[in-house]
Image (spheres, grey):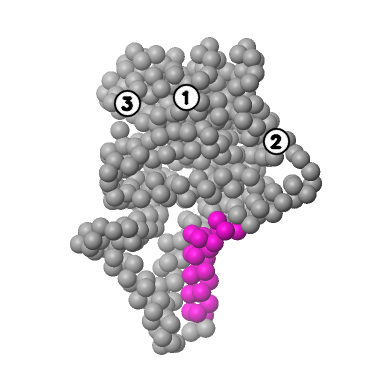
Amino acid sequence: MTTFAAIVFWVCALAIVYAQVGYPFVLTALVSMRRGRETLGGPRAPRRLGLARGAIPAAPVAEQPMVSLIVPAFDEEEVIAEKVANALHLDWPRERLQIIVADDGSTDATPERAREAGADLVLELPPGGKVAALNEAVSEADGELLAFSDANSEWAPDALAELLAPFADERVGYVCGQVRFLDPAGDNLEGAYWRYEMGIRSMESELAGITAGNGAIYAVRRSAYEDLPPSGSHDLSFPFRFAKRGLRSLYAPMARAEEKMVPTIEGEFARKRRMMLGLWDIVVGEGMLAFRGYSPLFAFEIFSHRLLRYATPFLHVLAFIANLVLLGSGWFYYLTLIAQLAVLGIALLSRRLPDDLPVRLCRYYVLTQASILLGLWDRLRHGPGGRWEKAAGTR
């Protein structure tokens, strides 16, 4: 029993450390090796698949692709006019840009304000959820390339051109840009987490492609688009679905967008818990777990960046239970148990402790892991969801 508990403890502990810390170091080594091989093999242009900057914008206006920029919206009257205005000021020929607002049963003046601001097409849809609204908007879109953005995202003027440049390569099906979260003077650490995430995605993009995008700024080749179920997510579903079809999903760091961040860690926890509601349908039901069709390198990325991350809270529970069994096996296991209890205690008592970085890190990490567990609990109780729930403080 003790031997089995020790195996469980160390396998779980090492998997947790690898998923959170080790994977970026492995990616760094793989990228360095690839760059070294390219250097030895002579010059290549462009070095990274599909990322020759300006590949699309350099073409004459008449030859540039028609682009549909789709903005899903639900009760966004506060920001929708600004979003449409932002889209109209992008560095892209107006006659080659279609702005679509897909209104998912708003109860406010979102449709009217979108039209007044200059949107080309405003779809007033019955309530069905974000993904259903996106599917409907794509069916009405004229563009051969489809760009997507949240209603509260502000794009840099050159963001669309940078986002679309990789599509000059026919093997590219999905591209996401860089989102920067504006800190509203709260204690949320999501901005720091996303800087870490963008670093990982930049390296994945150089290898087999990214394993997830973001909702603030991304684009899809129209011919590659797939209608998803209401519980689906473009961010998570498209990269692995496209990989099975031989299409690459890339990160374009120069395609920049900004969004307001949820002010508090507790608010971020509630947002993540809602996001995790449909996670298990994507991982199991949509086939993320079915590795057939992946390249070996992409399978490695999915396992390391997605599956181990989502399994981390369960690994923590197993490691904790195994640690209790091992308490009579030496002083080291008392230290590991104290360390685990200390992190949990700091997270639970954080509001009574000094508001410094270590305390906030403990609270953020524990609540992030808890959101995955509670998202599964919510899924088992209430089904896959799919309806809108906006995070407070992000508009």
- Residue 22 painted magenta: yes
Please identify the dominant SS of the magenta region: helix
For label 2, count other residues whose C-alpha is less than 10 Å away and answer few (under 14), some (14-19) or many (20+): few
Q: Nearer the viewer, mark 2 or mark 3?
A: 2
Amino acid type of the residue tagged 3 in the rendering: Val
Q: Which mark is residue 96?
A: none
The residue pinned by badge 2 equals 46
The residue pinned by badge 3 equals 79
For label 3, count other residues whose C-alpha is less than 10 Å away and answer few (under 14), some (14-19) or many (20+): some
For label 1, count other residues whose C-alpha is less than 10 Å away and answer few (under 14), some (14-19) or many (20+): some
**Magenta residues?**
4-26
Q: Are the two marked residues, 2 and 1, in contact with CB atoms closer than 8 angstroms? A: no
- Residue 57 painted magenta: no
Q: Residue at x 50, y 45 (%)?
A: 198
Q: Are the two marked residues, 1 and 3, in contact with CB atoms closer than 8 angstroms? A: no
Mark 2 vs mark 3: which is more N-terminal? 2
Mark 2 vs mark 1: which is more N-terminal? 2
Mark 1 vs mark 3: which is more N-terminal? 3
